[in-house]
Amino acid sequence: MLLAIDVGNTNIVLGVLDGKELVTSGRLSTDIKQTDEEYAIKLSSFFKLHGIEGVDSAIISSVVPALIGTLKNAVKIVTGVDSLIVGPGIKTGLSIKIDDPAQLGADLVVGAVAAKEKYPLPIIIFDLGTATTGSVIDKNGNFLGGIITTGVKTSLNALSTGTALLPQIDISAPKNIIGTNSIDSMKSGAVIGTAAMLDGFIDRFENELGEKATVVITGGLGSSIAKNCAHDIIIDNDLLIDGLRIIFEKNQ
């Protein structure tokens, strides 16, 4: 079985695959202060919790460079396996057309690889995590570029921290867009505002592409936002895990 690990700024997503089948998945908190052994304990507990045995390969992608070695060592401790790291020199099959391909984050590469294999081209991918990213793949499978903006939770945390009277809230859509109290107004701004922003980007991306595109959304907040968008959007919570599996297979 394959252990796929995607390290984000807030969460580490774990997926265990048997061939193309996702056996189980879960999340750990991202913490650069944790040691190899501490992450090994968490990984071992995750396996025991889900009854996982027989992991014989692993792949890691990370936007937190400080944790790559830590997690590679943790995987080695628990499974005895040397992990494949998504980075320069690895085969992805992705044609990257941005100004400096080396600048493209591992998470964007992995998501694009999965989307390209799973969905009709051209494709627009939104990943809603600590940051909100949008990636565009044209009809020929070229990664053209995209957008990066503040994530929903990041914005709300800044709002609550920087104001005296606005509280921390859960991320869910209000009953009405016109909020009649502070909490509903914040929810409308965060959820409906983000959905409206994505709708606007979809229109503008498609205008530059000159054609309609398949739109895919992933990330921890993807489903909450997608159902409030006006466009047809595919919600794929396992996009990055699938991308890691595909990249692993390309490098065997």
Image: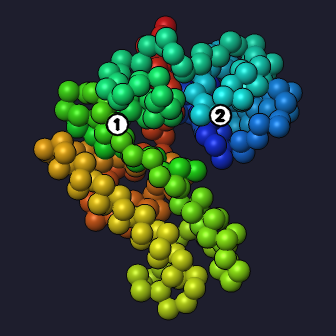
Residue shown at the point (39%, 46%) measured from the top left: 147
- Looking at the image, residue 76 sits to the left or right of residue 41; the answer is left
Q: Residue at x 42, y 86 (%)?
A: 178
Q: Quadrant of residue 161?
A: bottom right
Indicate the secondary structure of the residue bearing disc 2.
loop
The mark that comes first in sequence, 1 or 2, is 2
Q: Is residue 15 visible?
A: no
In the displayed structure, would residue 53 be above or below residue 212? above
Q: Position of residue 181 (x, y in %)?
A: 55, 90
What residue does disc 2 label? Answer: 64
The image's mark for residue 233 is: none
User: Label 1 neighbourhood size at 10 Å, few (<14), some (14-19), many (20+)?
Assistant: some
Q: Position of residue 19 (x, y in %)?
A: 49, 22
Q: Amino acid at mark 1?
A: Gly
Going by the image, does 8 lie left or right of 47? left
Residue at 61 percent across and 70 percent down: it is: 159
Across and down, in percent, residue 94 comes to 35, 22
Image coordinates of residue 54 in percent, x first then y, are 68, 19
Can residue 224 be seen here? The reply is yes
Relative side of 202 to 102, left or right: left
> How far apart are labels 1 and 2 at the CA level?
21 Å
Q: Quadrant of residue 46?
A: top right
Q: Residue furthest front?
A: 99
Q: Residue at x 58, y 82 (%)?
A: 183
Q: Look at the picture and state if 172 lies above or below 87.
A: below
Q: Is residue 85 above or below residue 40?
A: above
Farthest-out residue, bottom: 180
- Helix, strand or loop under label 1: strand
Q: How is the image coloured?
A: rainbow
Q: Which residue is mark 1?
A: 145
